[in-house]
Amino acid sequence: MDFRLNVFVEVARHLSFTKAARELFISQPAITKHIQELENIYKVQLFNRIGGKISLTPQGKIFLKHANEILAQYKLLANEMELVTEQFSGELKIGASTTIAQYLIAPLLADFIVRFPQVKVSLFTGNSEQIEDALENKKIDIGLVEGSRRSNHLKYSPLAKDELVLVTSSQNPIGESVAVTDIATLPLVLREVGSGTLEVIEKALLENGIKLSDLNILLHIGTTEGIKNFLKTSKNSYAIVSIISVLEELKNNDLKIVDIVGMEMLREFVFVTMQGGQNTRLERFMSFAAKWYSNSYK
């Protein structure tokens, strides 16, 4: 790894050669030398130096973006090599919110256990709120949740993007799309209060001037599987669910997506850990999960 990238990122973060030198335990002249070498190599000026203060130049901002990406890849490489070369054992208690538990975590853990048979894995499932409560009460080591809510005393790290879509029975004669304003008229089946899915739906609707209380909600069901089975029986009902949860039904033509014109419902699947509670064991699991997801959902 090019140490000069570390030097540049620290200077950019602190906007101070002195603070960067303290952070990296090297002299300030060494910091200056590394920055000058980078500027000479790429034939750009990375920092403006005015009156004892520094700031990033436009070229420096571009350089920072790529430097951060390169350093992140180095970290990922190091984690991958540790996974390959070192023993990984002990107990790992994982919590997964409902959508992730039903459609993502099982195949991930199956591959993880094959790769690391020495690790004793246990899985706790619930909605996003219940997973975070379990983490705070030390019932699990790490959680995987979806949704938009964030607690200040928990740490959230992204795993992957997800999209919520409006679905209905393939036998429903409705067209391929509806307007946002039509949502309130549709008979909907939604997840229960406390689910990450419902939080994302509520936020997206509010951004379009629609409240949950405005909707025509037939009932709340605690699992996406229950919602899908309801839709297959009730031909004219609708639901908003994660697209990964209906891939099989779309393939088999049991359900179909109805586009909501002008409205997207995007979210992230995220790891959640206690602030300051992340350790090498958890980092290795997170690295494995991120790599697995990237390879499985290209």
Image (cartoon, helix red, strand yellow):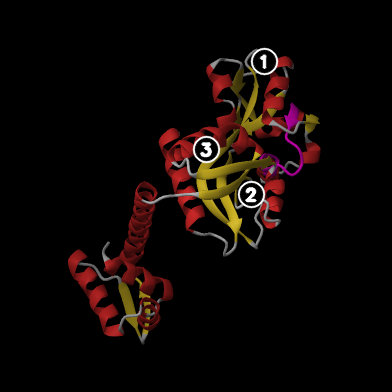
Q: Report the residue at 69% width, 28% height from top.
A: 239
Where is residue 217? Give x, y as percent.
79, 31
Residue bearing the label numbered 3? 109
Instruction: Relative to 130, say whether 23 is above or below.
Output: below
Q: Report the residue at 55% width, 39% height from top.
A: 162
- Label 2: which secondary element: loop
- Label 1: which secondary element: loop
Front disc: 1 or 2: 2
Amino acid type at mark 2: Ser
Amino acid type at mark 3: Leu
Q: Which label is found at residue 148?
A: 2
Rendered image quadrant of residue 121: top right
Q: Nearer the viewer, residue 174 or 275?
A: 275
Residue bearing the label numbered 1? 172
Magenta segment boundaries in residue numbering: 186-199
What's the distance in space between the residues labelled 3 and 1, CA to CA? 36 Å
Amino acid type at mark 1: Asn
Q: Do the CB atoms of the residues marked 3 and 1 lie less than 8 Å apart? A: no
Residue 192 lies in the magenta stretch? yes
Query: Which is nearer the N-term, disc 3 or disc 1?
Result: 3
Front disc: 3 or 1: 3
* Left or right of 7 on screen, residue 246: right
Q: Do the CB atoms of the residues marked 2 and 3 lie less than 8 Å apart? A: no
Instruction: Relative to 228, say whether 5 is above or below.
Output: below
